[in-house]
Amino acid sequence: MNKKAKVLLVEDDRIIAKLVKRYLDIRNYDVVYCDNGKAGFSAFNNYSFDICIFDVMMPYKDGFTLAQEVRKLDEYIPILFITSKTLAKDKIKAFKIGADDYLTKPFDMEELLLRIEVIMKRQQSKPKAPSEEEDDNARFSIGQYTLDVPYQKLYFGEGEDFRKLTARETELLHFLYRHRNDLIRREFILQEVWQNDDYYAGRSLDVFMSRLRKYLKGDPDIQIINVHAIGFKFIVP
């Protein structure tokens, strides 16, 4: 990458933190390290970051609380948890907070790097300044809404008011639009959008579907129907 991505690493295990920081530093990431949640939140308020990596069990402020406070300030910054908490309820809680990924300890450094790269690639994939033709081709009418894919914006009606979407929300809504009014199998959505169809990705999918239903509720003719044990239908008139 040409410009160093700035990483906020908050981890109270100094040995793990030192290994992660050294590994990412070598691979051209700019890592700011904090050893507790309180210090991590202070750093987030004082610097601009491209991605956050949080442990969960930490002194002063746990990772879940830290992530919730960060989300209040920035709804879109990627958050990756690295933690020894392996229970399903903890992973589900992380995704409901808005985590982009969840990696349990012990983990391989190369796997951590690959997960970061996937998240960063998704964040950076939208063009900075699309041409007029590209912009027209990347805006889609969805009932009373308009989805602007490159800029990750969802407009309602004819006005200029919009909701800013995350990269994952944009990708999922664009995917549903391309397959509108068809029955879409869960595993197909997970493989195409998440590149993973395990249990936790499936729970994440349900969370994102709930968000999209909320975002699109202004048009009663649009429906996201859950077909039990099969998949979804995205109904657009």
Image: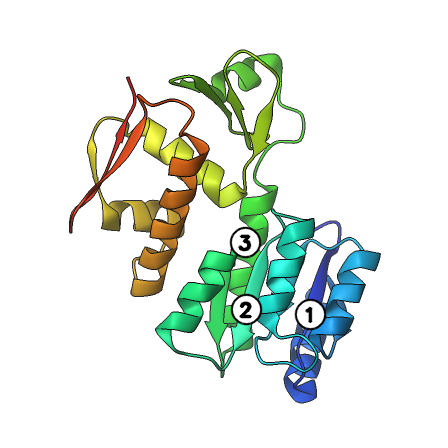
How far separated are the C-alphas under marks 3 and 2?
13 Å
Q: Which of marks 3 and 2 is nearer the N terminus?
A: 2
Q: Where is residue 60 in the image (x, y as percent from the top left)?
A: 70, 79
The residue type indicated by label 3 comes to Ile
Circle 1 residue: 9
Q: Is mark 2 on a helix, strand or loop?
A: strand
Question: In the image, 175: left or right of 227?
Answer: right
**Residue drawn at (73%, 49%) of the image:** 2
Q: What element carries label 1?
A: strand
**Residue drawn at (59%, 75%) of the image:** 55
Circle 2 residue: 81
How far separated are the C-alphas under marks 1 and 3?
15 Å
Circle 3 residue: 119
Q: Position of residue 170 (x, y in %)?
A: 48, 36
How far separated are the C-alphas under marks 2 and 1?
10 Å
The residue type indicated by label 1 comes to Leu
